[in-house]
Amino acid sequence: MADAAAKTMFKFFDENNDGGISLAELKETMSGVGCKFSGDEVEAFFKKYDTDANGILDFNEFVALSMSLSSNGGLTAEENAMAKLFASIDKDGNKSLSHEEIRAGIASFTGHAVDDKEVTALIKKLDIDGDGEISYEEFSSNILTKIAVAIKNN
């Protein structure tokens, strides 16, 4: 796992931004990105990689867990790329993409600025629950996002 990507993923999982990942954060985020593990399995992973047994995964423990899951089929390459892309756009780390984050993310990804009308139209297409923002589930279930991830990885 490349260092910058690992840091981005760590921030994505660290929901309260306290510098560590609790079992609850790990369960919630893994479920949110489509991992098909039971709560007991996630708890077993957590205990195995919480090497100092303090109830929190630090960055190095998280990297070890991530590498193990990647090699054992935890996340597919596409799911991992999708989660990294989302996390890189979600600047405030709240697991939801605001209008501004989407606009900045598109500009960063494409190298071209987009206007507010285009972003608003995109949000209307992707925003299933109507809250005005794009959740990870809404983001990852859209075919356009999957195409963008494929293009970025090739």
Image (cartoon, rainbow, N blue to C red):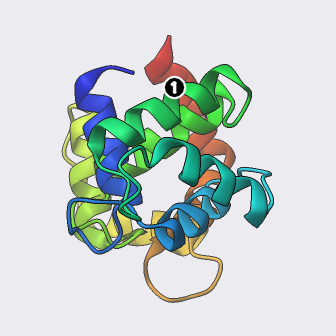
Q: Position of residue 57 (x, y in %)?
A: 37, 53
Q: Three-letter amino acid code at disc 1?
A: Met
Q: Does 132 appear above or below 61?
A: below
- Quarter of the figure that contains the N terminus: top left
Q: Residue at the spot x=33%, y=48% of the render?
A: 10
Which residue is at the front of the view, 137 or 146?
A: 137
Which residue is at the front of the view, 138 or 45?
A: 45
For residue 95, what is the image quadrant? bottom left
Q: Residue at the spot x=26%, y=62% of the render?
A: 101
* Structural crowding at the residue carrying mark 1, measured as other residues with C-alpha within 10 Å and reported as few (<14), some (14–19) or many (≥20): few
Which residue is at the front of the view, 30 or 96?
A: 30
What residue did someone put label 1 on?
A: 67
**Does residue 111 appear in this view?**
yes
Q: Residue at the spot x=63%, y=38% of the render?
A: 79
Left or right: residue 4 versus residue 57 is: left
Q: Position of residue 2 (x, y in %)?
A: 31, 20
Which residue is at the front of the view, 61 or 146?
A: 61
Q: Residue at the spot x=66%, y=36% of the render?
A: 75
